[in-house]
Image (spheres, coloured by chain):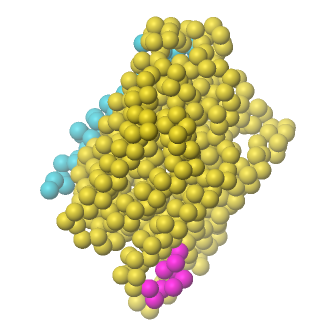
Amino acid sequence: MKKIYWLGLIPVLGFVIGALFSNRVTPYVLGMPFFHFWVVLWSLLTTGILGIIYKLDPANQKEDF
Amino acid sequence: MNISMFLIMLFFVVSIVIGIWSRKGKEMNLEQWSVGGRGMGTLFVFLLSAGEMYTTFTFLGASGSAYSDGGAIFSIVSYGCLATVISYWSFPAIWKYAKEHKLISQSDFFVKKYQSPYLGVLVAVVGVVACICYLVLQLKGLGYIVEATSYGVISSKIAIWIGAIGVTVFVMLSGIHGAAWTSVLKDFLILGIVVFLGVYFPIHYFGGIQPMYEAIEQAKSNFTVLPNHGMNTTWYISTVILSGIGFYMWPHSFPNIFAAKNEKALRKNAILMPLYQLILLFAFFVGFAAVLQIPGLTGSESDLILLRLSKESFDPWFVGLIGGTGVLAALVPSSMLLMVISTLLTKNIFQVFVPSTTEEQIAKIVKYLVPIITLLGLYFTFKGGNSLFGIALIAYNFITQLAPAFFFSLLKRNFVTKYGALAGILSGGVLVSIMSLGNITIGQLLPHIPQVIKDLNVGIIALFVNTIVVIAVSLMTKKISLTQLKAKAVTE
């Protein structure tokens, strides 16, 4: 197990643990209730984090054809 | 014939033509038909897996459920993202194994990993049942869309029949290639229309997204977040975990994985997928916009909310465009489902009991089963009465029962035996069926436990029992399978 893979846990925590305190209407962010904003934010972060893992993942360097 | 009906027909014909044309220059053996010869790059893998996800459900179910359930609908985006995270690792592992062993169905994967064709039969049965639920979902959606957007000229029943016949023809001829190309057209259209509607309605009726939410907050306080009872935080967390795990357990996800050219294509797919999830957000906006505009719809009526609102707000030609897109959104996933169901029935059930069937016969039977499955799907479509989100949740809970045996099989040293896998899937599946058919909640079974546990999604209880059974039975049967494996090694 490569160390960089542990990053994959961050989105899981963001969605699951985050639900415990993000379930509220105010403050509105980007026009959305806070709960909605939270889910949108973490969707974007998931892509970002997976992108970082992909860049650093040695498995992507070797198999090129 | 009115303009909207003309557009719907046009879309239908174009999609069938593309579907048939896409087989050009390819010899349609079973591997080509079902997994595209394993030669698809990032773009097509993405389109296929997105295509199966963005269906009539995106159109109708997501907006309908935002309208009736409020904040709970956001669980879809959350579990979709979690599933993607898992897929970054699980897809390449599945792909590699499938390529080595020339697998073409999900059930093949279990057969090979656990060395048990009968486990394959069970997995195939679970898959077929869940897929037929999903097919019914698509056909129902198709009927709703065409009936509404043709202003009642084409009845839902006729639309479902015509759509089903069209899709049967192109599946028989083109297999997965047809689905991939029609998906291209469909995804662009869905993207355009859902985003447009999601932006237009809040601005048109409320002057913006935030004013819309504020108006809802005033009329129905806390509607946009999770409630204290029912679909509350406990429900949300358990659903996100459950469906995140189960998301890619669908039999029709597997051929997409197998169709990839290499592992990188699959990893890139995982990176892009959460962004694609966000398209759903715009469908939610449509649903929220309707909360105050068209109040009072309940049950399966709420699935029509997007169409109702569009008809009140736009000219017929635009309604026709929505209708045409909706038709594609139903046809592409239906075609994938038909292919998968017939492959499972033929290869993983029929061939196990009639092993003398040759490969050429299999390839033929797979295709000739397609119209029969279509008829079966039609039967259930005209029979049932649940809302789209309701059917989807039941099918999800059912298919997720494959997850424990699947994830254990990815371990380097898997301790789970075929008996453990069989017993786990059976117990989880039976539990889900009893609870969802009898409409039993956990609170009814165990009235004295704390509220927090009562609100858990029933699927997660079944998944928990399933996992315990898998582990327990595996430990008990370890000896039997070891001696069997040794005996096998000796005879080989």
Q: Residue at x 85, y 38 (%)?
A: B448
In the displayed structure, B478 sits above or below B331; it is below
Question: Residue B312 at x, y = what percent?
Answer: 52, 21
Q: Quadrant of the N terminus of chain B?
A: top left
**Residue B75 in view (yes/no):** no
Q: Residue at x 46, y 59 (%)?
A: B165
Question: Residue B284 at x, y = what percent?
Answer: 50, 26
In the displayed structure, B146 sits above or below A26; it is below
Seen as rendered, the residue at the extreme right is B448
In the displayed structure, B337 sits above or below B14; it is below
In the displayed structure, B440 sits above or below B216; it is below
Seen as rendered, the residue at the extreme front is B1
Residues shaded magenta? B349-357
Chain letter matching colour yellow: B
**Residue B23 in view (yes/no):** yes
Q: Is residue B147 magenta-colored?
A: no
Q: Nearer the viewer, residue B419 or B365?
A: B365
Q: Is residue B350 magenta-colored?
A: yes
Residue A9 falls left or right of residue B448: left
Q: Residue at x 51, y 16 (%)?
A: A34
Q: Quadrant of the C terminus of chain B?
A: bottom left
Chain letter matching colour cyan: A
Residue B195 falls left or right of residue B442: left
Question: Residue B386 at x, y = what percent?
Answer: 67, 44
